[in-house]
Image: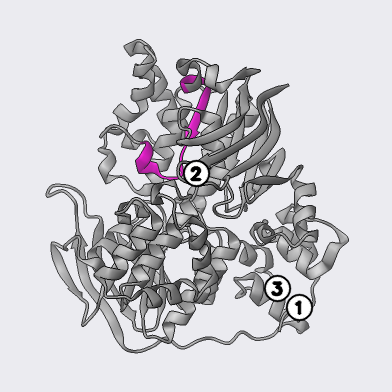
Amino acid sequence: MEIITVKNLSFSYNGSAQNVLDNISFGIEKGSFNLVIGRSGCGKSTLLKCIKQITAPHGTRSGYILYNSKDVTQTDERTLVTDIGYVSQSPDAQIVTDLVSSELAFGLENTGLDAREIRSRTAEISYYFGIASWYNKEISVLSGGQKQLLNLAAVIAMRPEVLVLDEPTAQLDPVARENFIDTVRKLNKDLGMTVIICEHNLENVYSAADRVILMDQGKIICNDTPQAAANYMLKNDVTMKASLPSCTQLCHALFGDREIIMSNALAKEMISKLRPEILKPRQKEKIKAQKAFEIKKGYFRYLRNGRDILKNISLTGFRGEILALTGANASGKTTLLSVLCGSLRLYSGKVSVPDGRVVFMPQNPAGMFLKSSVREDIAYTARLHNKSKDDTYKLLESSDFYKDIFLSIDKNPMDLSGGEMQRLAFFKIMLTDPTIILMDEPTKGLDAKAKTALADILTGLRKKNICTVLVTHDLEFAAQCCDRCAMLFDGQIISCEEPSRFFCDNYYYTTQVNKLVKNIMPDAVTLREVMRRCRKEE
């Protein structure tokens, strides 16, 4: 039985003649787990917002969406609020109160539940999601990942029939991401909740799906089982095949089309049969010696009588280096970036940034956009930094990472997808000619091809002696392009090593590829390294 039916749905934003959704039709079975994937800007987020209806963007729409056989535009608002839960890409965009307890109760209060029922539901949901220790906290002190968990908890407290999730794990650390997906799977399997989830990181979620809906340029090009969809992507050279789970990509690259592998256990068994003598030693890169910044014995807290967020922290960054800051949510990573860019000050310790022009790209780049169109926003930033029109367009054309900006040049920046916002924000900071770049979750919302293009740009910045510092939960990206990776725990840096050493020393907090090949290639942390060592790629 279909709980959601989409028929001939087309949509374009106000002021744009281009359809973001182009004659889409599909059905969602009651109690099923549905994964929506595709390149950044292909229409995934717009589709999910239209399903919720009260979150639908302004624009021109044709076709229809049915919920339990009734058009969502004709369904009463209370039913849409309670029956279809929605968690957006940006945690801050969904939060409406200042306390965790208030946020959990907000939706329940607005549906008219009595105080006893509200108290019971918020207590139950706090324990279910493991957030009881935050219950009385102010939301302003939570990390981005904690806010996302709070958003999900507040939605689930409403006990919806359908759960719509738009890249919900983008700001979660790897362990929290896995726990989050496990929780969603549990809601689906144990409670029969219908799940529609959009994700770029497919490692933990792909095998959980009953159906995979692959989108490209506003159309659905494949709607099938995970196995069949993976086969379609691998055989048709679809860009998204680079986002498939590591076990699938690795086994396909090593063993060809013999079998589509979806299981880590089976992949490890097959890989273990590779002969060690075909491996090549890995060459290590040297780190530049000139300091870009230095923090010595730094301490920071947000409240005078609060706990220290940074504790006796010391870190040096170098010119021509890409440095990744990793660690669990709320370990102090974003706070450290804010200290480096000068928006927060240590109460003890010292920060030195000699002759540095520091720019900061936050987790949510929406606050960086000041004009009503992408074209105007770029032009405004270019004028501020004395960039000519020719210089601006030369930069736009310098990388595939920027080229999709041309497709959205007349859109309002707020109508862009999460990945498109990331591209535009990064382009704007590059117009400032920085010497130190600080980025908080730069791969959030980016598809695999865009991540590779961004890595190429960052690698090129080494030659310009630019220091780049990334806060990231994307361990694969860090392993691919960073010179060093540092881990924060409880406000302190507990390790800082080059990627091979950093990840191979870890058992849980490492890349998926390293987990798969650890027994025979313990210091291989990327797919490219494994391919090179197995003589599949020189």
Q: CA distance from mark 3 to mark 1?
A: 16 Å
Label tally: 3
| In front: label 2 or label 3 | 2
Amino acid identity at mark 2: Pro
Marking on residue 520: 3
Q: Which residue is mark 1?
A: 536
Q: Nearer the viewer, residue 16 or 216?
A: 16
Query: Callout 1: helix, strand or loop?
Result: loop
Dot placed on the residue nearer the N-terminal end, 2 or 3: 2
* Left-right relation of 238 to 320: right
Residue 183, above or below 159: below
Q: Nearer the viewer, residue 255 or 83?
A: 83
Q: Do callouts 2 and 3 mark residues in contact (Cβ within 8 Å)?
A: no
Q: Report the residue that reaches farthest toward the right.
A: 258
Q: Residue at x 73, y 21 (%)?
A: 1
Query: Alpha-carbon neighbours of circle 3 within 10 Å: few (<14), some, or many (≥20)?
Result: some
Amino acid identity at mark 3: Ile
Q: Quadrant of the C terminus?
A: bottom right
User: How far across and how far down the image is residue 457, in percent?
Assistant: 48, 75
Marking on residue 168: 2
Query: Alpha-carbon neighbours of circle 1 within 10 Å: few (<14), some, or many (≥20)?
Result: few
Q: Can residue 435 be found in the magenta stretch?
A: no
| In front: label 3 or label 1 | 1
Q: Do callouts 2 and 1 mark residues in contact (Cβ within 8 Å)?
A: no
